[in-house]
Image: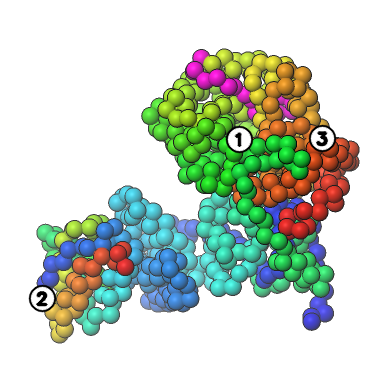
Amino acid sequence: MAERIATIASRVGLHARPAAIFAEAAAEQPVEVTIALENEPADEALDASSILSLMGLGAEYGTKVVLRAEGEGAEQALETLAAVLETDHDAE
Amino acid sequence: MSREESREFQGVGVSAGRVIGPVRRMPEPLAAPADGAPLPEGTTAESEAERLGEATAAVAAGLKARAAAATGDAQAVLKATALMAGDRTLLKSAIALVQSGTSAESAIWEAADAVATQLGALGGYMAERATDVLDVRARIVAQLRGVPAPGIPDSDEPFVLAAVDLAPADTATLDPSKVLALVTSEGGPQSHTAIIARSLGLPAVVAAAGTGSLVDGELLFVDGITGQVVQNPGPAERDLALAYTQRQPLPDFDGRGRLADGTAVPLLANVGSGVDAQAAAAAGAEGVGLLRTEFCFLGRDAEPTAEEQVEAYRAVFEAFAGKKVVVRTLDAGADKPLPFLTDTSEPNPALGVRGYRTDATVPGVLARQLAAIAEAAKQTAAEVWVMAPMISTPAEAADFDAMVREAGLSTAGVMVEVPSAAVLAEPILGACDFASIGTNDLTQYTMAADRQLGTLAAFNDPWQPAVLHLVQATVRGAQAAGNKPVGVCGEAAADPALAVVLVGLGVATLSMNKRALPAVARVLGSVDPEKAQRLARLALGASHAAEARSLVRAELPELELFGL
């Protein structure tokens, strides 16, 4: 199981637009990726490609989240997705 | 050219403009599926789950295609909505319900409800997104039923929107770049449809009986001036629509309303918030003729605090330093009920406890509001006048005047909406400082015709000669009471032809939606006082509203020039 902690960089938090960008990116990965708030048990992790789960997470600017994936390409997928979270999409 | 027959419908034109475009009908509202309805007969959990998967995929694909064709913010919103429709977690929880024996419709309804509730609990921005989830849910259920998605139809090309009537919630999602015109089979000149059309500057015809039979895609000519709607228009209608597109652009309002000879007719704005007030000031409004104070009360369970009220009023006053701002005290009741003030069980709320009358049933709210207005006035440089809605006797006018002075404000007035106030204008104006005529309610009460009732739309027209006679009576009474000023703040003031008539009747100031300022200013500037008086006499002498309108319009060539 690969794990990667990322910090939300979008000023508005993981709201609709940043959540949409992230959910789309997660769906494109070759492995299933989960997301959870830091310190939350792994079995409560949510599907990272679900925009509704992402929005329900209530992750604000600066919140730390844990991405997890298994299988071939997991490490690379987490790197890619962490980079998406650590970009401020409202600054674009 | 098609030789098909054309069909004509006659309604009431409520917002000027002539256009031709394909019609799209507003779908029926979507009925909620029954709570936990079982799998329909002849289906299995597997077949329902598959159907649900297909429906969500189809809705997601449709939204995605629209996102691809859109740009900017609209694209971002559509993209996010498409992802919600195809959301795996949502589908999984709905399918779990299907597998426990629930129908596809009820399952997606319940699953989305849980998500919306969760988002709602997060508050703020996320709570607003809960609405998007419910919108997606309705689209999926519509897809399952094989009916069009509820709400304003989706379309890539601009269209004429046809509906029974529009609710405020529908108009909030109306995209003026996609909607060419509005046509409703019900509703009157003061309906929400009419008001939103005027504020967006969209041509609109209401109460056009028979338009319910129009079919999506049919070509429609809409004349928001005459109220004519023609399906399958011919060369005559095409020429009219073409002429409208070639109309001269209206010059911006220069901030000084006047007749051709220079006689000043201050043009003010109707506003409902501080943001509104700033926009009105930017549009050149010479003040505020009607500040609707309901904005800080509506949608609340309890009276707002003094601090909240002072803040809200101050935001408006600050936009008009050194200028007049006429504040209408709380006008609750009838179509604007307030839980802490009005009784919704009245059998006939338009004739019930509303406006100033609520001070008798729930004393204190008005006095506290006046105190807040006085405090906000003290903190700013606006010239603050206050007026009470729904005054019907000289005694009420005197009582209100006393309350206003008690609060430390200097100028008290009344709204003339009830015919008795127009008839007794002299003693009423003898007891206070000014009057402002609310033509919407004055028309409904004079003609005894419900403002929202499409079948009575022809009665509910401020061009009704009886209404104009009451305007004249008000002005005469005010003159006899010591030349007290009379303004008009109803929708009538925003109709440039009617504005000329009102000025001809002796009305001193006109207050309107800021969008109407350029048109009204331009047409008033084309007439001198003698002509305005002559046109007023023509309108007073007409036998019905349509005749009054056409007699006066025929004398105002500026209207044609600017497509008004």
User: On the rendered image, what quadrant is the C terminus of chain B found in?
Assistant: bottom right
Badge 2 marks a residue whose secondary structure is loop
Amino acid type, label 3: Ala
Name which residue lies at 39% across and 64% down.
Answer: B107
Q: What stretch is highlighted in magenta?
A: B406-422
Amino acid type, label 1: Gly
Residue A84 drawn at (x, y percent): 23, 71
> Where is mark 2, residue-wise?
A1
Q: In this view, does B285 lie above or below B86?
A: above
Report the chain holding disc 3. B
First-in-chain label (3 vs 1): 1
Report the chain holding disc 1. B
Question: Relative to the observer, which residue lies in front, B352 or B217?
Answer: B217
Determine which of the numbered discs, if any, sits on residue B466 in the image: 3
Determine which of the numbered discs, if any, sits on residue B289 in the image: 1
Badge 3 marks a residue whose secondary structure is helix
Name which residue lies at 35% across and 53% down.
Answer: B125
Q: Residue furthest front?
A: B261
